[in-house]
Amino acid sequence: MVSSSIPDDIVAQSAQFVEVLAAWERALPALSWHDVMAGVQPEQVALFSVDMLNGFCYEGALASPRIQHIIPAVVATFRDAYAAGVRDFILAQDAHSADATEFADFAPHCQAGSREAQTVPELAALPFADLYTIVSKNSLSAFQGTHLGDWLEARHDLRVAVIVGNCTDLCVQQMAMHLKLYANAYDRPLRVIMPENAVQTYDMPLATAQELNVLPHNGAVLHLLSLYHMRLNGIEVVRALH
């Protein structure tokens, strides 16, 4: 029998590291759109929104107040991006099949054609919503089974990708990592920027998880760990974009 590589005192060993991560997160600097746009043209910048849907904010099995709370920051990021001249807005959104394989791991949610799968009204109502490119996805990755890979291939001059949405440790991380690793593989100078105030993940307390017989999910811890993990992979994590 192969023994676990996790030490018995992992909690005690990790306490100081978690304190360091929390201090890092609290000290995140804000970034201005003026700095973002310095040295690039507006057509070289794109804003990616991940799963800002009714089914994660307002209704359904996976709706979360933590995610609903970031809507104002997401909307502000959209407005500021537009004011800065950005015109590429990519909305990667769950539109699951009725028998989606993913439902083995997550409760059924955001099925294609449902109210849950609709963009939150705050984003849908923006006056430039006609510029949105909707990417319907059936998995955690917006690049699997969609046309987003072709979109990216056609934009060799993309220099800045800003990412907002949910969940930090799931679909958002998949989006950020794909963009950054793709750019690295082809030696393209792509900045992938993530404003912390405009991304979030859900919470599943231990007691609730045990009652439902599902995996627990500490939103605060996993949000923090995911942000730091992305920073380790070259993604710029900032407090907010102003």
Image (cartoon, rainbow, N blue to C red):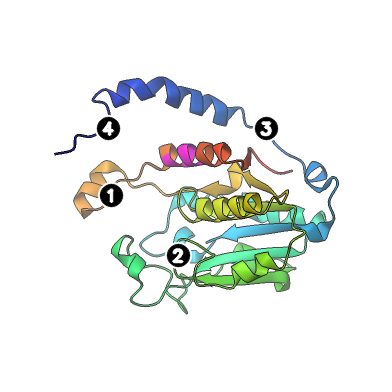
Q: Nearer the viewer, mark 4 or mark 3?
A: 4
Task: Please give left or right for residue 158 compared with residue 15 in the image.
Answer: right
Q: Are marks 3 and 2 in contact (CB under 8 Å)?
A: no
CA separation in Å, label 1 and label 3: 33 Å
Element type at marker 2? helix
Locate residue 116, reporting x and y percent. Answer: 46, 70
- The type of residue carrying mark 2 is Gly
Residue shown at 52%/64% (left/top)?
A: 53
Q: Are marks 4 and 3 in contact (CB under 8 Å)?
A: no
Locate residue 12, reporting x and y percent. Answer: 31, 20
Element type at marker 3? loop
Residue 41 or residue 85, whichever sits in front: 41
Task: Report the residue marked by disc 4.
Answer: 5
Between discs 2 and 4, the one toward the N terminus? 4
Task: Report the residue marked by disc 2.
Answer: 55
- Indicate whether residue 223 is drawn in magenta: yes
- The type of residue carrying mark 1 is Leu
**Does residue 205 lie above or below 170 as drawn?**
above
Question: In the image, which residues are magenta?
Answer: 222-226
Residue 101: tell me if it is visible. Answer: yes
Residue shown at 72%/74% (left/top)?
A: 130
CA separation in Å, label 1 and label 4: 21 Å
CA separation in Å, label 2 and label 4: 38 Å
- The type of residue carrying mark 4 is Ser
Q: Residues within 10 Å of mark 2 (few under 14, many from 20)?
A: many
